[in-house]
């Protein structure tokens, strides 16, 4: 049983496209995290949110607590956005999704 | 560069052996987290230390142990290694104890290969 489900698993987009990655969770949480993992393996924390919406540059993250759902949007995608995006939730425990592999083609 | 350092970068060892992975948190961070990332299990939280004390435990095997020293660096000890322990091991740090209100900064990881 997966406490955190992400979709899609893989995503290929043309440069400039608007991208959405979805995350659904089944446990009670105090926060949801979006992480980015580049091909070299390094992980960067993009967002940590417990309600509403956050924006950082071309990235936007939203969360709907009632529906237990979050989305990560990338506007005007660029090849450097190519990475694995991982959703994680924290409550009593720390649970990770399996990640969405994004490839942006020039 | 996150400011979190991990050594070694790569480690190759044999089944049954014991290894120690080291993590130095960002300056000023009191919390250290350990994660395992394998191909079949994805990312998993292992354990968290805050200011020298164990704060939270995840899916850490009994063969694994960790500690955080007075200078705040942390070590993850893996013993009686099995093939399935081959994975990337990440360390992360944050300023305070709560994993829900404090951003974590990840180290570059240690790639462990058990032959």
Image (spheres, helix red, strand yellow):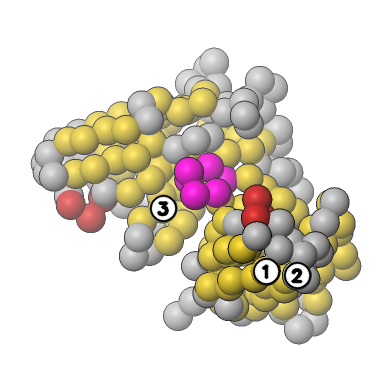
Q: Residues within 10 Å of mark 1 (few under 14, many from 20)?
A: some
* Residue found farthest to the front: A106
Tell me, yes or no, whether the highlighted magenta stretch contains residue A42.
yes
Tell me, yes or no, whether the highlighted magenta stretch contains residue B12.
no
Contact, mark 2 vs mark 3 (Cβ under 8 Å): no
A62 left or right of A44? right
Contact, mark 1 vs mark 2 (Cβ under 8 Å): yes
Q: Residues within 10 Å of mark 3 (few under 14, many from 20)?
A: some
Report, in whole angstroms, how far the alpha carbon at label 3 lies from the one at label 1.
Answer: 29 Å
Residue at image position (51%, 26%) is: B5
Task: Find numbered disc 1 in the image and state the secondary structure of the residue it sits on.
Answer: strand
Range shown magenta? A38-43
Report, in whole angstroms, how far the alpha carbon at label 1 lies from the one at label 2.
Answer: 6 Å
Q: Which residue is mark 3?
A: B37
Whole-percent x and y of residue A74? 76, 64
Q: What is the quadrant of the N terminus of chain B in the image?
A: top right
Q: Chain of mark 1?
A: A
Q: From this viewpoint, is residue B54 visible?
A: no
Whole-percent x and y of residue A86? 58, 61
Residue at image position (34%, 65%) is: B40
Residue at image position (21%, 35%) is: B12
B61 left or right of A3? left
* Residue found farthest to the bottom: A67
Residue at image position (70%, 36%) is: B96
A13 left or right of A73? left
Dots 3 and 1 on the same chain: no
Report, in whole angstroms, how far the alpha carbon at label 2 lies from the one at label 3.
Answer: 30 Å
Residue A14 has which mark? 1
Q: Which residue is mark 2?
A: A17
């Amino acid at each position: 049983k997966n406490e955190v489900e992400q979709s899609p698993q893989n995503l290929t987009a043309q440069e400039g496209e608007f991208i959405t990655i979805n995350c659904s969770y089944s446990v009670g949480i105090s926060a949801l995290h979006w992480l980015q993992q580049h091909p070299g393996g390094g992980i960067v924390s993009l967002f940590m949110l417990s309600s509403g919406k956050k924006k950082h540059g071309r990235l936007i993250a939203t969360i709907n607590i009632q529906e237990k759902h979050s989305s990560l949007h990338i506007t005007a995608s660029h090849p450097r956005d190519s990475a694995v995006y991982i959703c994680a939730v924290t409550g009593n425990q720390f649970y990770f999704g399996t990640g969405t592999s994004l490839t942006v083609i020039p | 560069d996150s400011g979190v350092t991990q050594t070694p970068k790569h480690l190759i060892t044999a089944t049954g052996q014991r290894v120690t992975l080291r993590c130095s948190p960002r300056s000023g961070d009191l919390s250290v987290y350990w994660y395992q990332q394998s191909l079949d299990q994805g990312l998993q939280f292992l354990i968290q230390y805050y200011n020298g004390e164990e704060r939270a435990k995840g899916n850490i095997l009994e063969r694994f142990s960790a500690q955080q020293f007075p200078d705040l660096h942390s070590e993850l000890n893996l013993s009686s290694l099995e093939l399935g322990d081959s994975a990337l091991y990440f360390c992360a740090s944050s300023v305070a104890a709560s994993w829900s209100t404090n951003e974590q900064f990840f180290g570059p990881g240690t790639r462990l290969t058990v032959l």
